[in-house]
Image (tube, rainbow, N blue to C red):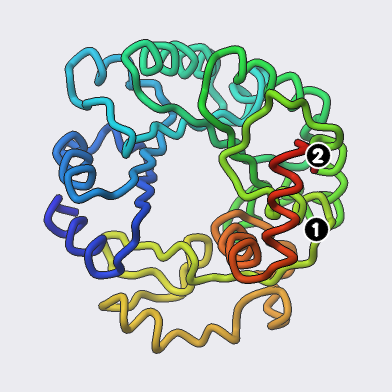
Amino acid sequence: LSVEQCLRAVEECGAPIVSIPGGEPLMYPEIGRLVDELVRRGKYVYLCTNAIQLKEKLEAGLFTPSRHLSFSVHLDGPRAEHDESVCREGVYDQAVEGIREALRRGFRVTTNSTLFEGASPLRMREFFDEMMDLGVEGMMVSPGYSYSKAPDQEHFLRKSRTNELFARMLSKPKWRWRFNQSPLFLRFLMGKHDYECTPWGNPTFNLFGWQRPCYLLQEGYAHSFQDLMENTRWERYGRKSGNAKCRDCMVHCGFEATAVNETFGSLRGFVETVAVTVTGRL
């Protein structure tokens, strides 16, 4: 994709927040210019990265600190767990080095963690402490989605196991833990809410167009954002639809939007969010 194609897509859908995922965005030759243009337009940018090249790119002066730019660093837990998840030793330490360099230079840094079957609630709580000690602004956690083409199906979380894991992991959260997520979404993961997916909440644009219906499923492409919104059979997706591909999904890209709508679209949701924010109790 060219920078111009990316910018047209952003303007077409009118999103105030833009996530640049990968692959690895730092390998995109025009990533510096793309981020600059998005920030100049007042967009909030989350650049998702494994941070292996982050220190190098920062030293090269590719980015300028801004309240509109956050590096979202992929870390699936403590050192041993993360290195195992990416099948490469030493990646955790490289990522931490990149985080430290970004923070030293005044950049905003968050983390994103995808959890699978076998994840330890205790080890993840230790990881949250590590990230707070490191100085990241906030953390994002989500269960992994069971892609049908993935060779390792046994380690994807099912709904009941997701609730069990997150309930144990997030029970009695420490006051200093900061999550870059809606409190209601975290409570949903813990089994305290039963939300339906909002598949259009995080529209995805790539080389082929607007992906139907969401970031996780690949069932064709729309030629425009309007076409995506108006001509996608949304009733075919979400857990209540009976679609087997959606049955165990609890991923943030569909359910975070629902939680945010609940927060600002209902008095109950707003009061609950305020209560969690004030007390720190999930």
- In-image side of 281 versus 6 (left or right): right
Rendered image: mark on residue 21:
none
In the picture, the quarter occupied by the C terminus is top right
Which of the marked residues, 2 or 1, is nearer the chain's N terminus?
Answer: 1
- Residue 159: give its label: 1
Residue 22 locus on image (x, y percent) = 38, 44
Label 2 crowding class (10 Å Cα cut-off): few <14, some 14-19, many 20+?
A: some
| Disc 1: CA contacts within 10 A as few (<14), some (14-19) or many (>=20) | some
Q: Residue at x 17, y 39 (%)?
A: 36
Tell me which residue sits at (28%, 31%) in the image.
66
Is residue 192 found left or right of 80 in the rendered image?
Answer: right
- Name the residue located 77 percent from the left edge and 23 percent from the top edge: 123
Q: Position of residue 157 (x, y in %)?
A: 76, 50
Foreground mark, 2 or 1, reads: 2
Secondary structure state at the residue bearing disc 2: loop
Type of the residue with mark 1:
Lys
Kindly identify the residue that appears in the image at 74 percent across and 26 percent down: 175
Which residue does the numbered mark 2 point to in the structure image? Answer: 281
Three-letter code for the amino acid on which mark 2 is drawn: Arg
Q: In the displayed structure, would residue 221 be above or below residue 176?
A: below
